[in-house]
Structures are given as structure tokens and as C-alpha cells.
Image: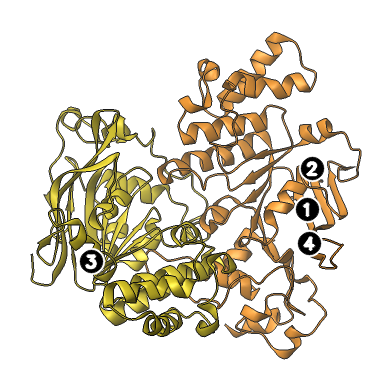
Chain colours: A yellow, B orange
């Protein structure tokens, strides 16, 4: 760990309670994010990526419970701090952008008010002052005519504009860490490009670290410096973004990349049948024994069925969790 | 490549769908022109990719093809027969065109077994012989890679990918000539998508089906389509062979769409266009794309709306500056 580590997640385990029985939804996930770094978590639905981010910002609730591990923000263990301390950190030092801006915004409150609230709650500003800062914050996310727009309600805005408001709220207090959970999945591609650029520009200008979560491997590789790949509650591979795409080590990552119809591939190489990963993504209650990918893996051996592989460190500095990697 | 001699199984001529909003009483009646003068042609064994952002009219167009949305103008000719006329036999249309929906969770009846889901269309179409029903259900399941003994199960017992296979089997059961695929893989897990894409392509080859595929995932569109039509605010702005669309796009909007896709190997997000799709109630004058277009000139802002012009063989573009822009970059 170097000194500029901002967030360090160590051995995080999260259980999903089904009835009285806990099922491990996230198992022994460890990663760290440096100041100003953009880190990506990629995986399919149910792999535990969103739940991991909820744990970081302290919003896990029943039936999800943290079953182990530590989450350190600048050395302060977020899993042991009081609720009021967590509330103070949330918004001020850690902020989050959600996938669906319509459900994340309050439909009954003008957007300017929702931004201004941040300054009142976290910076002790008066409402009058905060309203002025809200106009500025809205201008920063490139909303045209912000002084008029602050009076609008969420339903008066398009999806892209709503997501800009979410970003304005999230960045209002200059957080150290921004969690972005599928921030553009609900948006059209041209709007997605604008929002991604906005997140990238604002975070790099302010030195905000970003943890971006998506199922879109292409987007994550493009936006992030380092990438973690999750499968069935496990972080199965972590590498520099370039290496993940060019030199994936885990059979799951390799299979996933080979299964994507990448833009431009047919024009360059002609149409080839896409690689299929056999089987289905397991549900939390049915995570298999041993390596969780083993029922779908072509390299699976007896060892994989019996023993959960440990991390193997790669020369590049990343790791892979597979008995037969490479 | 598409065979010029094989007859079109689907022809859409000057199709218009308008929706009226508001009430006449208070004089605030306004219309949204969701589909605006669309012409299309589709041959058997061909996949037409329909691309555009939300609100461009691609889903309304698909619903019109299925008879689920009555057009306000123009004609839809399926296998030589005008099916957009009122009073057309819906069962006949159902035998010619079927649809696969985006969400395999909400598009299957949870209270019907797979067997009932697949047998119901056959019964509706007058097939009552039990052996024939069994044979055809078994065959349809086999085509989509499901074992026939699964027919007694209910949708909740299947994974997303398997449900989409059931949706495809249901579309296949009446042996249609055309299948409308409305975002066929976007609700599926990434690792499952390839299975469905491969299945659809293989079925197209072996059964000689024609597809109209709607997708916002340009990677999927490039992989599957023979021809591509790009829609913007109800109009087709560019249509061509897949290769021309993806390697030499000529309309600024098509270029913007393609370059907006994040390149996993590059660090540039690509060139962007400003703004968002305008309100379809007040269309901009002249070219509808001009407020967002980096190449807009004065002429683009003036009426009339640019014509869809053939600038290369089979390559149509609705842009008065297509020729200059194409050469310039």
C-alpha cells in the first residue's frame, strides 16, 4: 500500500439473507483505489459489484449484511464508525451517482433545492448562499441557462440532464471518492459519451477518485486505469485496463471478451460465430463449490471443483484467481 | 450480398404514424410524427438493422409491422399483400410476421407452461391434430436448443437466456417469413448474449428468415445485419449495406452514433455531438438534425427537409452536405 491510497477494501464479505439462512453474495473482495484514480468494477447482474459499492458508501440494508472485512477511507474504518459519522462522510467525502436518475431524484423538489441541500447539510451554508452555489454547480455540469434551470423539477428534464443534476449533487462538496453505478446505462449512446466525458473532466480537474461500475467491458476499459472483474461474488481478476482487454488471464474474462460483437470486428475480420460461454450465471444461493466459474469453464479440472483458487499475483501488478490461468 | 432478383418479402411504402396529443376542446391539440415517410424493403434471408436513439420511431415502426399500431398513412406489403389496410385478416398477418420482444421476463405468461405458450398459436390457427401439435412444438424447441421434455415447465423455471429461446420458439411456431427482433439480447446477461446471437444467425440461414432487428448496441447491429437503416426523429436519415454504414458512414448523425461508442482499446471517448434529441412535437425546420450537427450550414436550417438521396449504389443519405462532408474527412 502506498501513501496515496484513498480507499482500501480488505476481505469484504457480504451475505444475502434468504429466510434465516445467509448466502454469501460477495466473498473476500479486496481492492484499493488511489487518490484521483479511476477504478472500474465490471461484471454481470448478480455478481456483487453494486452491492460492493453500497457497502463502501454504507447503504447496505436487510436482506444484505456485511459479514466481514474492512473498508478503509484514508485509514478510517467505515465499518466501525457511528451512523452519524457515516452520514457526515457520505455526500461530503464519498458520493454516488445511480443508474436511474429519475428514481434517485426527489420528484417533488426543484433540482436547485436538491443541489443546494448539499451545501446546507455539509458546508453549513445558509439556504440563500446555497442557492447561489447550486446555480454554479449546475453550470459546472454544463447545463445551459443554470439560473433558470434550478427552478425545474426532475420531470421537466431529459434523462441526460437529470444525470447531470445527479453529478452536480454528487460533486457539490468536492468528494474524494465518487461511486458511479452504471451511470449511463439508461441513456442513449450520444448522451452517454457526453456524460462520460463530464465525469472524466470533472473528476480529473478536482482530483476525485472514481469507482465506476458497469456490465459494459468496453466502457470500463475505456474510462478506467485499473479494472476488477467480478464473477459470482468473487473478484476473479484485476489488472490495468489495457491488459484486461489485450491480455486477459481468467477464463471468464477471456470468454467474455471473445463473446462480444465488438464494433468494427466484422469489417476487419469478417463475420465469425461469437464464442459462447456455456451454462448460465448462477444465482446467489447456487454459487458452486470450488472455483465459482468451474461449471462453465472449459479448463475445469477436479482441482477446480474442490478447491477455491487463491489469488495469483501477475508480473503486471494485478492478480487472477484461477488454477489454470493464462 | 443481397440478391437483387429475390423478391422482397416486406415492402414499406411511405409509412406514417402520427399521434395526437392534448385535447381539441382547448385548442392545444398537437401531433407527434413518430414515423415520417419511411420506405423499406426486406428480402428473405436478410437482416435489416434499425438503429436510432430513443424516440426516433423505430419501435413504433416495428409495432406497425406487427399490426399492433395502426399507421396513419402509407402501406405495408407483406409477401405481396397489403397488411396495413383496415379489416385485414390478423391471423394471416400472424402467419407471416412474428416478433421477439426485448424482455423475456415480462413477455412470457408466467401462468402458462411452455407447452401451452407454444401450442396456443397452433390451435388458434386451426391445427387441432394432437400429433401434429406435438411434432411442431418439439421441432420449434429443438430449433432453439431446448430439450422437448422442458415443455411442461413454467417460465420461472428458466434462466433469462432460456426464456429468450422460448420467446424465439413462440415466434417460430407458425413458420413466419419475417421476424421482428426488438432489442433481442439487451435484457440478457453479457455472457449469454453470444448464444442468442449465434442462434438467430443460424436460424436465418437454415430457415431463410428475414429479420427486422432493432438494437441500440451497434456492435450487435454490425455483427448481425445485412443492411442498416438509421432513424432520427421519425425519418430514415441513412440506409445502406452494413459495411458502408460502418466503414463509410455519410450522415453526420450516423458518424456521431458510431464514434460515441467507447473503444475498449483506445482512451478517447470519441467525437461527440452536443445536445439531445429535440422534442418531437416541435421539429426543427429544415434538416431535423441541424441543431446538433457539427456541419450545419444556413441551408440546413431552411425548409424543405432534405431528400433521401442515393449517393452511392444502394447507399441513401438524407443530408444536403453528404457529398462535401464525405470527401472532407
Pointer 4 residue: B22
Tell me, yes or no, whether dots 4 and 1 are on the same chain.
yes
Front-most of B153 and A229?
B153
Pointer 3 residue: A88
The residue lying at 51 percent from left, 63 percent from top is: A108
Q: In the picture provided, is B7 more to the left or to the right than B273?
A: right
State which quadrant residue B97 falls in.
Answer: top right
Looking at the image, do the residues carrying marks 1 and 2 touch, with CB atoms under 8 Å apart?
Answer: no
Pointer 1 residue: B41
Pointer 2 residue: B67
Of all chains, the one bearing label 3 is A
Front-most of B295 and A40?
A40
What is the C-alpha distance between the residues marked 1 and 2? 17 Å
Where is residue A32 drawn, in percent x and y?
Answer: 17, 61
Element type at marker 1? strand
Tell me, yes or no, whether dots 4 and 3 are on the same chain.
no
Looking at the image, do the residues carrying marks 3 and 2 touch, with CB atoms under 8 Å apart?
Answer: no
Element type at marker 2? loop
Q: Say which of marks 3 and 1 sits in front.
A: 3
Q: Say which of marks 3 and 2 sits in front.
A: 3
The first of marks 1 and 2 along the sequence is 1
Amino acid at each position: 500500500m502506498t501513501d496515496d491510497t484513498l480507499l482500501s477494501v480488505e476481505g469484504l464479505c457480504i451475505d444475502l439473507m434468504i429466510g434465516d439462512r445467509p448466502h454469501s453474495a460477495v466473498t473476500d473482495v479486496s481492492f484499493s483505489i488511489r487518490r484521483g484514480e479511476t477504478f472500474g468494477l465490471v461484471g454481470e447482474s448478480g455478481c456483487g459489484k453494486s452491492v460492493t459499492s453500497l457497502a463502501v458508501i454504507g447503504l447496505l440494508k436487510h436482506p444484505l449484511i456485511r459479514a466481514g472485512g474492512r473498508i478503509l477511507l484514508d485509514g478510517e474504518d467505515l465499518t466501525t464508525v457511528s451512523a452519524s459519522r457515516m452520514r457526515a462522510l457520505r455526500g461530503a467525502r464519498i458520493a454516488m451517482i445511480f443508474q436511474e436518475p429519475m428514481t434517485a431524484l426527489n420528484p417533488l423538489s426543484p433540482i436547485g433545492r436538491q443541489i443546494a441541500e448539499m451545501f446546507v447539510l455539509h458546508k453549513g451554508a445558509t439556504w440563500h448562499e446555497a442557492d447561489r452555489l447550486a446555480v454554479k454547480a449546475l453550470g459546472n455540469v454544463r447545463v445551459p441557462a443554470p439560473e433558470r434551470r434550478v427552478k425545474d423539477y426532475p420531470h421537466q428534464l431529459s434523462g441526460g440532464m437529470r444525470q447531470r443534476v445527479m453529478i452536480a449533487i454528487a460533486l457539490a462538496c468536492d468528494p474524494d471518492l465518487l461511486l458511479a453505478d452504471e451511470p449511463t446505462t439508461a441513456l442513449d449512446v450520444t448522451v452517454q459519451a457526453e456524460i462520460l466525458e463530464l465525469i472524466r473532466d470533472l473528476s480529473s480537474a478536482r482530483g476525485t477518485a472514481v469507482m465506476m461500475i458497469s456490465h459494459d467491458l468496453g466502457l470500463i476499459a475505456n474510462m478506467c486505469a485499473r479494472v476488477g472483474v467480478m464473477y459470482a461474488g468473487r473478484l476473479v481478476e484485476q489488472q490495468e485496463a489495457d491488459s484486461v482487454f489485450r491480455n486477459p488471464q481468467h477464463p471468464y474474462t477471456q470468454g467474455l471478451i471473445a463473446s462480444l460483437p465488438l464494433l468494427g470486428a466484422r469489417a476487419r475480420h469478417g463475420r465469425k460465430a461469437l464464442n459462447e460461454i456455456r451454462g448460465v450465471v448462477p444465482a446467489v444461493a447456487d454459487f458452486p463449490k470450488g472455483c465459482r466459474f468451474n461449471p462453465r469453464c472449459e479448463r475445469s479440472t477436479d482441482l477446480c471443483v474442490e478447491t477455491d483458487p487463491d489469488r495469483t499475483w501477475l508480473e503486471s501488478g494485478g492478480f487472477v484467481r484461477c488454477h489454470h490461468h493464462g | 450480398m443481397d440478391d437483387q432478383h429475390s423478391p422482397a418479402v416486406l415492402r414499406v411504402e411511405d409509412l406514417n404514424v402520427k399521434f395526437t396529443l392534448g385535447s381539441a376542446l382547448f385548442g392545444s391539440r398537437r401531433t407527434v410524427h413518430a414515423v415520417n415517410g419511411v420506405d423499406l424493403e426486406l428480402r428473405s434471408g436478410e437482416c435489416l438493422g434499425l438503429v436510432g436513439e430513443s424516440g426516433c420511431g423505430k419501435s413504433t415502426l416495428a409495432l406497425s409491422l406487427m399490426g399492433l399500431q395502426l399507421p396513419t398513412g402509407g402501406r405495408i406489403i407483406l409477401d405481396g399483400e397489403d397488411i396495413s389496410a383496415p379489416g385485414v385478416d390478423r391471423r394471416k398477418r400472424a402467419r407471416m410476421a412474428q416478433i421477439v420482444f426485448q424482455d423475456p421476463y415480462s413477455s412470457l405468461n408466467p401462468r402458462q407452461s411452455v407447452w401451452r405458450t407454444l401450442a396456443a398459436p397452433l390451435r388458434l390457427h386451426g391445427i387441432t391434430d394432437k400429433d401434429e401439435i406435438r411434432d411442431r412444438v418439439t421441432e420449434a424447441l429443438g430449433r432453439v436448443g431446448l430439450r422437448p421434455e422442458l415443455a411442461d415447465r413454467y417460465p420461472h423455471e428458466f434462466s433469462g437466456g432460456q426464456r429468450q429461446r422460448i420467446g424465439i420458439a413462440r415466434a417460430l411456431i407458425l413458420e413466419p417469413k419475417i421476424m421482428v427482433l426488438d432489442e433481442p439480447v439487451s435484457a440478457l446477461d453479457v455472457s449469454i448474449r453470444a448464444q442468442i446471437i449465434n442462434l438467430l444467425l443460424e436460424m436465418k440461414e437454415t430457415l431463410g428468415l428475414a429479420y427486422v432487428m432493432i438494437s441500440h448496441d451497434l456492435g450487435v447491429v454490425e455483427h448481425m445485419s445485412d443492411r442498416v437503416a438509421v432513424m432520427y426523429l421519425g425519418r430514415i436519415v441513412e440506409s445502406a449495406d452494413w459495411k458502408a454504414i460502418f466503414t463509410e458512414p455519410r450522415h453526420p448523425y450516423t458518424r456521431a452514433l458510431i464514434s460515441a461508442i467507447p473503444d475498449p482499446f483506445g482512451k478517447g471517448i470519441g467525437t461527440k455531438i452536443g445536445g439531445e434529441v429535440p422534442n418531437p412535437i416541435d421539429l426543427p425546420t429544415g434538416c431535423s438534425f441541424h441543431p446538433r450537427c457539427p456541419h450545419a450550414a444556413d441551408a440546413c436550417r431552411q425548409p424543405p427537409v432534405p431528400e433521401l438521396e442515393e449517393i452511392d449504389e444502394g447507399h441513401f443519405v438524407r443530408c444536403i452536405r453528404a457529398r462535401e462532408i464525405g470527401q472532407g474527412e
